[in-house]
Amino acid sequence: MKNWPQGERPREKLLASGAAQLSDAELLAIFLRTGIPGCNVMELARNLLHRFGDIAGVYQASLNDFCQVHGLGTAKYVQFQASIEMAKRYFAQELSKGVALTSSPMTREYLLAELKPETREVFAVLILDNQHQIIRFEKLFFGTINASAVYPRIVVEAVLQHQGNAVILAHNHPSGVSEPSQADKHITHKLTEALALIDVTVLDHFIIAGHQCFSFAEHGLLR
């Protein structure tokens, strides 16, 4: 890539315009650093995305599947897994510094980092204090790829245990469709009613689907 125009080199592009301006392939290329004989690093990155679909697919790949891509091995797999765990811990630590979560982009990023890689449906809750600062994040229910049984009693017990004053609900749609189902709306209503009995407010319910993050509050679906 030394012969490429400077503005097209991923590293130089990141320094000039910021990481958000890079494509998935360019970000992967920076991470991979080098290509292999007959395949430059950008081609290697595109091969990864083609094989696994997107960056989430790369992170979700098993060690065996990952290492079947020519030019990759256990060391790169370990680096990928470490990088996503660092991202999760970064968002968790930022949230723990007293950021109010009523309408925070950091909340979305944290929930995306936690729930996007999941291949089955997971229902979680962010438990907050009376200043809407995070007390605890808990994954409470685990279902199949298209259903998760959510019991209000378990949610209420978790909130009481950690002395929460408000919550943000969240679950993922592994299907990639972010629109809430009737079941999603129903359980949100049931949880809102159950938590109201202990004077706990549901601030929002986020659905994570791929890169998308649907907010019940922003769409006027909280009652």
Image: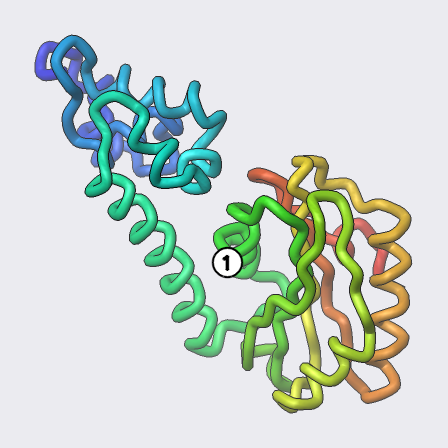
Amino acid residing under circle 1? Tyr
| Residue depicted at x 76% and y 71% | 202
Q: Quadrant of the N terminus?
A: top left
Judging depth in this view, the residue of 111 and 216 nearest the camera is 111
Q: Badge 1, how many Cα within 10 Å: few under 14, some, many 20+?
A: some
Judged from this view, the residue extending furthest toward the front is: 64
Q: In this view, does 52 lie to the left or right of 126?
A: left
Q: In this view, does 34 lie above or below 189?
A: above
Secondary structure under the numbered disc 1 in the rendered image: helix
Q: In this view, does 104 lie above or below 19?
A: below
In this rendering, the count of numbered labels is 1
Q: In this view, does 124 lie above or below 37?
A: below
Judging depth in this view, the residue of 68 and 46 nearest the camera is 68
Mark 1 highlights which residue? 110
Judging depth in this view, the residue of 76 and 205 nearest the camera is 76
Residue 171 is situated, as x and y percent measured from the top left of the image, at 68, 55
| Residue depicted at x 80% and y 49% | 219
Q: Which colour scheme is used?
A: rainbow
| Residue depicted at x 42% and y 59% | 88
Is any part of residue 158 visible from this angle? yes
| Residue depicted at x 80% and y 46% | 180
Judged from this view, the residue extending furthest toward the left is: 2
Q: Quadrant of the C terminus?
A: bottom right
Residue 21 is situated, as x and y percent measured from the top left of the image, at 37, 31
Quadrant of the rendered structure where residue 124 is?
bottom right
Q: Is residue 147 above or below residue 22?
A: below
Residue 173 is situated, as x and y percent measured from the top left of the image, at 68, 44
Residue 186 is situated, as x and y percent measured from the top left of the image, at 90, 58
